[in-house]
Amino acid sequence: MLAILKKYRLFLGVFIVFSAIVLSLFYSALKPKKTLPIYNPADVNPELVDSTVQYKSKYHTIGDFSFINQNGKTITQKDYEGKIYVADFFFTTCGSICPKMTSNLSEIQTAFANNPKVKLLSHTVFPETDSVPVLKAYAIKHNVNDSKWNLVTGDKKEIYTMARKSYLAVKLGKPSELYDMVHTENFVLVDTKKRVRGFYDGTKKEDIQRLIEDITFLSNE
């Protein structure tokens, strides 16, 4: 038996290597490739979507915007053109979920510190109190990198419109107060074509890890 093995050892070696390669190729071919969905208003909880766009089932993109950031600079869609970014809604005096969300956004900022293709965009839902100086103090407190992460304020109606018609991420507040908003824990992933590609719970570490993986996937597409 030993003599036979010695005689055919080269053949067996080649056979084993060939088999491993074939199995690897079969596994790669059969393994489903990672994809990310493209979200439209019709795909999302209606509570988070303005009634005027709830019917829309395709071709949804983030609308144009113009807000003021923590440095008093006007931020528009052009600042995010060709970028992958994470958007959220918060307010600086929030003591419940906002500190956790901000901490997790800081983690994302760190993860992509050297990737100029990735940015962050946080909108206040209380622009009447979150002025530029207030946002600046908040940014300093949380080590916000101004070139990577914009905290923005502006006209409440415009913020409301973006939240409900573009990012599909904010609930209605008091029916008696026009443009009242209740922000959620949602982080919204937007791709380079201004399409919504994912929603993540900004308070959960497992969702943050999934978000980092999905940003990396989009970066490598």
Image: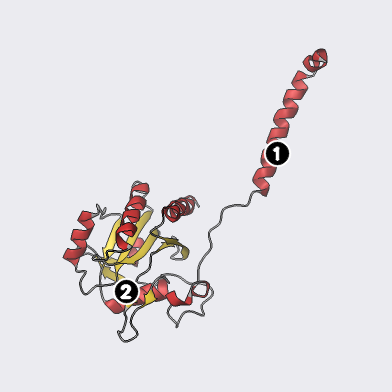
Earlier-in-chain disc, 1 versus 2: 1
Residue at (71, 37) in percent of width and height: 22
Query: Is 25 left or right of 106, judged from the image as shown?
Result: right
Which residue bears the numbered disc 1?
23
Asked if residue 81 shows in the view, the reply is no
| Badge 1: residue crowd in 10 Å (few <14, some 14–19, many ≥20) | few
Residue at the top extreme, as displayed: 3
Front in this rendered view, residue 200 or 31: 200
Location of residue 216 in the rendering, given as x and y in whole percent from the top left corner: 45, 50
Quadrant that contains the N terminus:
top right
Residue indicated by mark 2: 159
Q: Which residue lies furthest to the left in this view?
A: 133
> Count of labels shown?
2
Q: Which element carries disc 2, helix, strand or loop? A: helix
Residue 38: x, y in percent? Answer: 52, 65
Q: Is residue 98 above or below residue 216?
A: below
As drawn, is 93 to the left or to the right of 170? left
Residue 4 figure quarter: top right
Q: Nearer the viewer, residue 186 or 166?
A: 186
| Mark 2 surroundings: few (<14), some (14-19) or many (≥20) residues within 10 A | many
Q: Residue at x 54, y 75 (%)?
A: 57
State the image coordinates of residue 160 (x, y, percent, origin top left): 34, 76
Image quarter of residue 170: bottom left
Q: Is mark 1 on a helix, strand or loop?
A: helix
Q: Residue 171 at what x, y percent from top left?
A: 39, 75
Q: What residue type is labelled 1?
A: Leu
Q: Nearer the viewer, residue 59 or 40?
A: 40
How far separated are the C-alphas under marks 1 and 2?
A: 53 Å
What's the residue at 77%, 23% (across, down)? 11
